[in-house]
Image (spheres, rainbow, N blue to C red):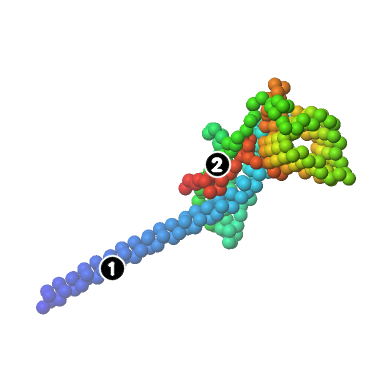
Amino acid sequence: MKNEKGYTLILVLIIISVTMIAVLTLSSAALTTRAQLNKTDTRNKMIDIAEMGITYYQPVVTRYITSAKASARDKLAKSTAKTFDEYFYGDLLALLQTSVLPVEVDTATNKFEITFKTIDKSVANKMIINFESKGMSGSQSATINGFFTIDKISGVSNAGQQNPAKTSYAINESRSLYLSPPSKLTPYNASTYFSSFIQIQGNHTLKIDGNAYFTDLKLAGSAKLNITGDAIFGKDIFIQDNGVRICITGKTYKIDANNNLVDYPIAKNTCSKPSTSDWFFDANKGIKVKY
């Protein structure tokens, strides 16, 4: 009997020991799994915050592009020392290098930070903006690399071609014209070649239904120029006042020393359409991320 009790005690002790080891092992595994899940949850949270940063940066870059294009047109109108693309790239780069302060998401410890890296111009007719979005939660952080692609629009342009002959226009206006109130509208119902000086001032509108060529043009006061076609200028337009309004639905060109057409963007042209000198950011196709 004593031997049986001894064996029974030993067996019970063995069972208890095995059970305790199993419980400790399972508890350790559960704690490890829990820690891993917490770590994964924290990283996923930081990734989510970093993705918010990319969403936030998208309209910022869109505004920068619009501003850089407007600035480039103004500079090109004043000086042809650089091309439109060169002016645009320089102005966009300066804007992108402006620091973006960290943005809080829901609490002071959850925030994202955008860091601009470079503009890659290695691919023809593309500019790829490379940046980082860092999601932060307390002392933890996760970074996503973002890429915004800006494409050069391939519009139809006659730049480089010979200046069309005067005879290609339906109307040849040889008079010098000084257009001002009380008359408010001077219309031409077909393509017109203006071979002399034209001045529009006050609240007066010159309207041409077709292409137009201007040897010398001055706009002042609240003058309006409306052209439903292309416009070619023998020299720079002289715009005297901020109240001037220009609407040219076609392309705008200037004549170079060889009597060839060159693109001539006009900053005040509110009806301009994309040309080969325009850049476009499609937010639906031009965004890529690398985790």
CB-based contact (under 8 Å), mark 1 and mark 2 = no
Which of the pair 213/274 is nearer the observer? 213
Residue 258 appears in view: yes
Residue shown at the point (62%, 47%) measured from the top left: 62
- Side of 281 relative to 75 (left or right): left
Which residue position is annotated with label 2?
149
Outermost residue on the top side: it is 258
> Does 37 sit left or right of 83 as displayed?
left
Q: Residues within 10 Å of mark 1 (few under 14, many from 20)?
A: few
Instruction: Give how far across and how far down residue 47 sits, in percent.
Output: 49, 53
Screen quadrant of the N terminus: bottom left
Question: Where residue 137 sits: x, y (%)?
Answer: 53, 57
In the image: residue 124, left or right of residue 60:
left
- When asked about the image quadrant of residue 176, the answer is top right
Residue identified by numbered label 1: 20
Query: Residue at 57% across / 41% down in the picture?
Result: 150
